Image (tube, grey):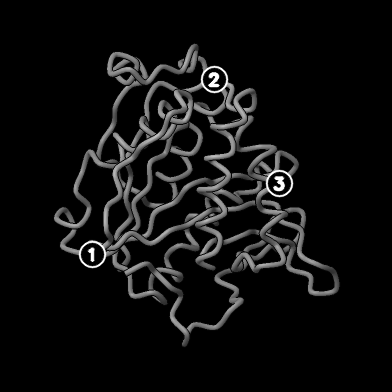
Amino acid sequence: MPFSRPSHLPYPNIWSRFTTNRGTLRIQDVTEDMQQQAMDLLTTYFTRDEPPCKYIEIHKHPTALSELQKLWRNALKDNISIACVVDDDSQPPNIIGLNVLNVVSKEDKEEPFQTEDSIWAQLFGAVDLVARSVDIFSEYGVDKYLTAYGLVVDPQWRGCNVGKELLLARIPLCKALDIKVTATVFTAAASQTVAKKAGFEDLYEITYEELAAKGFVFPNIEKDTKTSKLMALVIN
């Protein structure tokens, strides 16, 4: 059965607040009226900065880009993705950081991955290989877990711990959803470092050189990052 946000859970909800040298920020649900803004941020910065997207030049491949955008849109419809905004209700929220989230259930019907687009096959296939490297259900004895399809921070707000706070906000979100673990493929050295600071542990690591040997080639990606990792955080 596809995931649906529990009716008893307030929406939209604020999951955390934190202070920076630029003022107080909050992590909240991405509301329906924020979804296009979220898509714009992802399309502008995630595709430019996330290493596999960057080095496969996904912005030059409309079909692959469209598939990625469809993945984001479908996840956003579940109403559990979270955004970082300035904590000021006097103006409409402007997203400065975003984490596109999804709940994976053991009972989900698994659809075989099929595509005729070689670029999307490379991008999705590489992440899927790492995601399947560990059976999260058996590893942690759970029947569902929280995962993610994209973490992005507006360049003007980088250095303010927005990424870390978005990852930490998964803790109260998971507790509200009665989820005991969150696991994500982190494809960049920077996001892997942030995840480690947020308490995530390494479950599996593969170098991009090893991925290339398996047919998932991202030219010159080693300039930015050496490995792709599956990392998890247990919710206590």
Residue at numbered disc 1: 107
Marks 2/1: CA distance?
Answer: 35 Å
Q: Nearer the viewer, residue 207 or 57?
A: 57
Whole-percent x, y for residue 108 in the image: 28, 61
- In this rendering, the count of numbered labels is 3
Residue 55 marker = 2
Three-letter residue code for mark 2: Tyr
Horizontal side of residue 181 vs 158, given as left or right: left
Marks 1/3: CA distance?
Answer: 33 Å
Horizontal side of residue 176 vs 31, given as left or right: left
Q: Residue at x 45, y 70 (%)?
A: 173
Name the N-terminal-most of marks 2 and 1: 2
Q: Is residue 193 above or below residue 123?
A: below
Q: Residues within 10 Å of mark 1 (few under 14, many from 20)?
A: few
Three-letter residue code for mark 1: Glu
Name the outermost residue toward the right.
Answer: 90
Residue 44 marker = none
Dot 2 lies on which element?
helix
Q: Quadrant of residue 37?
A: bottom right
Marks 3/2: CA distance?
Answer: 20 Å
Dot 1 lies on which element?
loop
Name the N-terminal-most of marks 1 and 3: 3
Three-letter residue code for mark 3: Asp
